[in-house]
Image (tube, coloured by chain):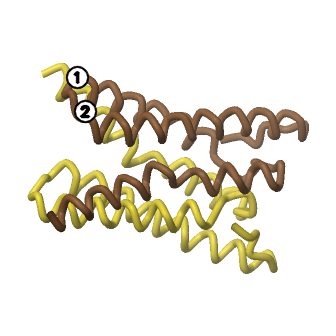
Chain colours: A yellow, B brown
Amino acid sequence: MIWTIIGALAATLTMFSFIPQIHKSLSTKSVKDVSALTLFQLSLGVLLWLIYGIARRDAIIIVANAVTFVTLAILIFLYFKFGLSNGRRGGN
Amino acid sequence: MIWTIIGALAATLTMFSFIPQIHKSLSTKSVKDVSALTLFQLSLGVLLWLIYGIARRDAIIIVANAVTFVTLAILIFLYFKFGLSNGRRGGN
């Protein structure tokens, strides 16, 4: 029971972990110090976790990775929106 | 078998996903657009995943989260090193 609670808390913290980054990027409209490679690599990894979870019919893996994927997609959108509007891509 | 490969690929991509961010932060020596809250929330979540993995004796969960935790610890160190040396904390 205690481990289920710790697992649920771990999943909740990690799946919403990019919300503060989205908030910060929206506030500052600057993303030049954020690594696009990290965003893309993590998105691809999370997408594979999602496929893995669907194949295994594991609801926790599906929900956690679906939420993370959506927040990462928003961040990638903001990366290009603010990165391009500042006239630079910021590199890796 | 195919799902084991997809799971292993997912784990590999996600556990090393912060290496490009470490590389970028070391190159630019600037972290002001990176959210410290995201780093702390993710670190706490990953630490709980690690504890959960140890309790469940699940090697994949242990290794994946141990590696991610180390890379996040390096990023948090860089965040304070470069954030403070630039005379600002950068907020959330």
Q: Which amino acid does label 2 sit on?
A: Gly
Q: Is residue B33 above or below residue A41?
A: above
Q: Which amino acid does label 1 sit on?
A: Ala
- On the same chain, marks 1 and 2? The answer is no
> Label 2 belongs to which residue?
A7
Quadrant into which the N terminus of chain B falls: bottom left
- Chain ID for label 2? A
Q: Which residue is drawn at 41% across and 67% down?
A: A44
Q: Residue at x 43, y 34 (%)?
A: B66
Residue A88 image point, x, y percent = 79, 76
Element under label 1?
helix
Is residue B42 among what the camera can see?
Answer: no
Q: Nearer the viewer, residue A11 or B25?
A: B25
Q: In this view, does B31 lie above or below B62?
A: below
Q: In which quarter of the image is residue B28?
A: bottom right
Is residue B79 among what the camera can see?
Answer: yes
Residue A38 image point, x, y percent = 56, 60
> Label 1 belongs to which residue?
B55
Q: Distance between the residues labelled 1 and 2?
A: 10 Å
Mark number for residue A72? Answer: none
Residue B83 image point, x, y percent = 80, 39
- Chain ID for label 1? B
Left/right placement of residue B5 relative to residue B37 reads left
